[in-house]
Amino acid sequence: MITIKGTLSRITYQNPENHYTVCRLRVPKVVEPITVVGHLAGVAEGEQLVLQGSWTSHPKYGDQFKAEMFEVTLPATVSGIRKYLASGLINGISGFLADKIVDTFGEQTLDIIENEPDRLLDVHGIGKRKKRLIEKAWNTHHSVRRVMQFLQESKIGVTHSSAILKTYGDKALDVLQTDPYRIAVDVPGLGFQAADTLAKAAGTKADDAKRLGACILCRLSDLEQDGHVCGEKDDLIKFCARTARVDAALFDPVLDELADNKEINIEGERIYNHRLYRAETGIARRINALLSMPVRPFQINPGQIMEEVLASLAVQLSDEQLDVVTRILEQRISIITGGPGTGKTTLVRALCAVFKRLNLTVVLSAPTGRAARRLSEVTGKKASTLHKLLGFDHENSTFMRNFSNPLDLDLFVVDEASMVDTALMFHLVEAMPPTATLILVGDTFQLPSVGPGNVLSDLIASERIAVFSLSNIFRQAKESPIVMHAHSIRNGELPDLKSADPSKPSEFYFIENRDPAKVVETIAELCAKRIPKAFPHIEETQVLTPMHRGEAGTINLNQRLQAVLNPEGPGIDSQGQTFRPGDKVMHLKNNYEKEVFNGDIGRVMEVDKAEGTVLVDYDGRGVSYDLLELSELTLAYTVSVHKSQGSEYDAVIIALTTAHYPLLQRNLLYTAMTRGKYLVIIVGASRALTIAFENDKTARRLSGLKHLLMED
């Protein structure tokens, strides 16, 4: 690695979440400051830095130094110390006070502030209150430097260092030195090996119970990230024995101790972390309790149902639909499932009309903001996200609505229920009033929830809940090749997707192209020219792709589409992206203060480079982001198939190449295809399409919900 030294002259950008920094460094004998990028936690303008890394070339910003390791070099001379303290870096020390402190202690000044702060009381004008202020400010600023130095010496990467600092704050160094295995459990994605490196350096033995316990907890955390609710005991022990390089027999007493401390729960051959065990058993307990309650007799007959639906919705229910509505009224909990065009939405609208006639309260909800808005559009009734409805408190990670403070409703409809994970389903059923009716609506053939569990499928498999599987495709839906092709794939039949004549209007096209670079160019041409010309009625075109990286991944496609669709105008740069007025953007994390949620898509309205702000329009509501908040935004000309769940777009273009092989599955293909309302175009290789279709082995998710429900 290359080493450079210099003075930090300006911080252009710093992400408070991961400390990713873009800055300018003045280097001796170099006229212009150089640009430095990297995870530089705790640095401030005016400080002397020693950086290790390599030179890179950015296509837009030119040569940059990418820092892999860094060190803040504190001044050693009296003049340097005087200038350092007078710079304003340490809150409470003015230029005048800096002179007095340095005049008193000379070259020992910084060492005294760091290690003997009580001696500051010897300086005229510094009392106990001022001393505490200086001591706190010094520790706040330099605790980051100490942690970074400790981790770098321990060969822990700067990305992980930032996550550790975010988790523990100024207590990070104490945690690292006294209980390093905590970081394996508390810091997502860090992993057991990083913590083990620190612990071994401190002399921890291979068979230490704390080390083996951390290995188990970390493995359960990794399984959760992969969608599992629990681990299978034998596999868990074998994996941990290999990872820790110890005899498997050593883990039996460790498991017992973790269970005694309520860090894990052992349910036969299933091992849970305590939080997910509480959630999964809570779902089973609450559903069984709700099912045991007598169903309220609704004073309405089939004829009145038909009459009300026809009067309210101008819809004539089919015999199947009338039968389903009538039978749902006899259930405490029901599941409505089926593919596109089978009438799921019509049933929900009909049930809303019936409950309105009965003067009962109906509440509609969905897991995401876009899914809730879509539900509201198709029903004509207000729908909320589950987090908002349940009163999620983001500061304390608690829900206002619960068993002791249930929701006020008679009918609770949850759409896109396949997206609801184990933890959220637990809070959902906990907040159910004991006399209300719950209806879960979803398509089990879509991708499962991002979070752990496969709740909707487990509920169906338990056979404890009434399930209404809709298979009859209505006439108008049968006229749509999108619907018919989706059902063919759902039923295990690969349709002839190439049958559409590209020279004639259709709703579905497959454009063969094996070269990922040409796939990108074809998609750019479709978005910029061909679709607007051939389908002027289409207002929104969304590109979908299975992966983020690669030629046909979201990152590259977004850059290419921005260059074609919105190439000019003033912009603000953030982490390799430029945001301009007119750009399509997606919000990446739930922000309850702004009331913008993970997956929400908007358009940039204004960019103020002087103020460093970006104003985004979300369905008519303007939301402002400052420079430090731009990490919550990304370009959204292209989004992953997973991010598109719960959404529907006028037109969908799907990039499908063999480079996407790790994620090619039938349910991913099906999910992507069913996002389009009027037009679906697949651009890619026939081989990739075949791979996706033939891979019907949906990854098994470990959980015990089905068994817990069946045991009642």
Image (cartoon, grey):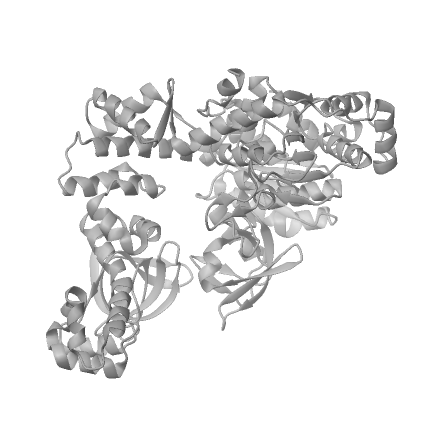
Whole-percent x, y for residue 144 in the image: 27, 58
Whole-percent x, y for residue 301 in the image: 84, 23
Quarter occupied by residue 456:
top right
Q: Is residue 325 left or right of residue 654?
A: right
User: Which residue sits at x=70%, y=34%?
Assistant: 410
Closer-to-camera residue (188/480): 188
Whole-percent x, y for residue 558 in the image: 52, 51
Quarter of the image where the N terminus is located: bottom left
Counting the numbered discs, the total is: 0
From what the image shows, is residue 37 above or below residue 294? below
Q: Does residue 494 appear in the picture of this structure?
A: no
Whole-percent x, y for residue 394 in the image: 49, 49
Q: In this view, does 284 lie to the left or right of 510?
A: left
Query: Quick one: which residue is furthest to the bottom in this view?
Result: 96
From what the image shows, is residue 444 above or below residue 370? above
Closer-to-camera residue (111/332): 332
Query: Quick one: which residue is furthest to the front in this view?
Result: 404
User: Which residue sits at x=26%, y=82%?
Assistant: 95
From what the image shows, is residue 508 above or below residue 607? above
Closer-to-camera residue (26/507): 26
Q: Is residue 302 left or right of residue 441?
A: right
Q: Does residue 100 appear in the picture of this structure?
A: yes
User: Which residue sits at x=47%, y=45%?
Assistant: 397
Quarter occupied by residue 17:
bottom left
User: Which residue sits at x=64%, y=23%?
Assistant: 293
Quarter occupied by residue 138:
bottom left
